Amino acid sequence: MKHRTGIMSAFLPLLVVIGIVGLVASAARSSRVPSSRELNQKTVAAAESMVAVESIVTKVDRLFADQWREAGIESAVPADDLTLFRRLSLVLHGTAPSLEEIRQFESDRSGDRIDRWTSRMLADRRFANYFARRFSRFLVGAEEGQFVVFRRDRFWAWLGEQLHLNRPYDEIVREMISQRGLWTDKPEVNFVAAVVNEGVVDHNKLAGRTVRAFLGQRIDCAQCHNHPFADWKQSQFEGLAACYGQVNISAVGVEDNNVDKGSAPYRLQDRLTLEDRDIEPSVPFHPEWMPDEGRTRERLAAWVTHPDNRRFDRAIVNRVWGLMFGRPWIQPVDDLPNPNDAGIDPTDLLDVLGADFRAHGCDLKRLVSTIAATRVFRLSSQHPAFETGDRADEVEQIWAAFPISRLRPEQVIGSMLQASSLKTLDQKSHWTMRAVRFFRELDFVREYGDLGDDELTERAGTIPQALLRMNSDFAAEWTKSTILSAAGRISGMSPDDEICLDNCFLVCLTRHPTAEERATMIKQLEGTTGDIRSNLVEDIFWTLFNSPEFCWEH
């Protein structure tokens, strides 16, 4: 312990140095050999798709270039490729990349490797699984719900499969809103089952969540009275809630009452007269988008996802933008202004990306890859204004540098767990390793603090969180040098001090050490062997884990 304390005193100043540096697919193959014609068709389709992506990326880049020029502010320089690689891995997989992946990435010398690795990450099952968990927060909330009628794990698995297959987002939403059945057999019905309380479906909560999640607007305030600041009326909210008036929970799962006999009356007690009154299902705007035929929930689902409903497209674009940048384009993410009735606004980012999203079949992976290819996503988080303080707020407001955001709890523990292994921890890992990761992540998030439903609101770090990273069993377990751990293998197998230090930094921070960091730490490693060297590598891991840089996306 005395040795550890002495080494820590030498490394602790580097926490500040490192903090400043940090802050300033495989598709299934058919056994049949495709014909040359089929190959040519696929090649042409891929080329056309790439041209289409480049076209929309050019439009987005032009919007930001115009914005920076009008403000008289130069954008930050492009981030280096390793920074982008870490950024993409955190965003798409919820963890920093492994040393195995970093070595593969560094060996790729092609000029478009960021684009190709983005596609590779999107094809990896980890993307679908991670985004399913992120989406679940706004689709079914962060509350546990009633286990008897709500199965979050089944919903996660179902949604992950839909994202992995890249099913059109509008189809996924229609199934969540309208599907019937048992929450285990038809996991999509958990969107409805999540709001069940003591066997009763909360129609009001379901109506409010539908508009928040899928249209990016808050109509909840109109539940009891006309909205004081927006156009929403109480009668509009009641009509929307009545669209769910037929749905209930029974022994066969989520079902609709009196489907064969027409719409069942939805009754509310008038707050003034205390008398019951029947409410007809209706929607708050553009009723012509709602079909005349079908079950009420099916008609509602068609209205929500209607091709002309720009709120639907803008809402998902804003959310995906928020997931990728750490903050949405417009905040709050579920309180967007009404779109311009005049049509698509070529100067509105959400309209531009939303129109492209709809034109290409509500393809979520394409939306993600488009945003990842934009200039603004690939900017450095460092900007001269942050050094001088001159117009720093304006730089942030106009996105002239990549926004720095604190890692989410599962990203912190995911990165720590991955850093404990040189091999990639993914769906191909042994089931015991995957089980350990799953349960350790749950334990860590529980102690670190969950973010709840409102995950895109910036929160400050806490002292207990910092202490958990420093002194908990998690930190001790994942920095320990053993014959199987990353720290142990780097200590015992690195051919020299330089490579040993490089490997430590790549595993923990996905970058090489700076000249100053290298000069300081090499002195500690020189001439060491055996347990002393192992302890030093453990100390380096501990120092890097607890540096400010480790806990931020930048």
Image (spheres, helix red, strand yellow):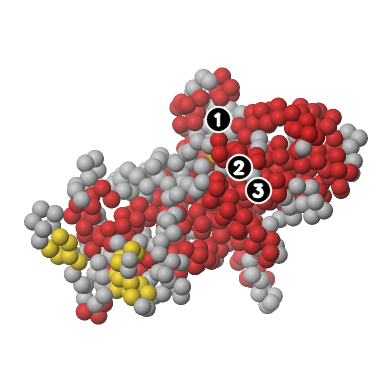
Q: Which mark is residue 75?
A: 1
Q: Residue at x 45, y 49 (%)?
A: 452
Q: Which mark is residue 311?
A: none
The answer to whether residue 14 is above or below residue 60 is above
Q: Which residue is mark 3?
A: 474
Q: Quick check: 127 left or right of 105? A: left
The percent coordinates of residue 206 (x first, y second) are 32, 60
Q: Quick check: 181 left or right of 165? A: left
Measure the C-alpha gap from mark 2 to mark 3: 8 Å
Asked if residue 240 can be seen in this view, the reply is: yes
Q: Residues within 10 Å of mark 1 (few under 14, many from 20)?
A: many
Residue contact between numbered discs 2 and 3, judged by CB atoms under 8 Å = yes
Q: Amino acid at mark 3?
A: Phe
Q: Amino acid at mark 2?
A: Leu
Q: Residue at x 49, y 31 (%)?
A: 396
Q: Residues within 10 Å of mark 2 (few under 14, many from 20)?
A: some
Q: Quick check: 77 left or right of 230? A: right
The quarter of the image holding the C terminus is top right
Measure the C-alpha gap from mark 1 to mark 3: 39 Å
Q: Which residue is mark 2?
A: 468
The earlier-in-sequence mark between 1 and 2 is 1
Q: Residue at x 46, y 57 (%)?
A: 136
Q: Secondary structure at mark 1?
A: loop
The percent coordinates of residue 157 (x first, y second) are 52, 66
Q: Secondary structure at mark 2?
A: helix
Q: Quick check: 213 left or right of 34? A: left
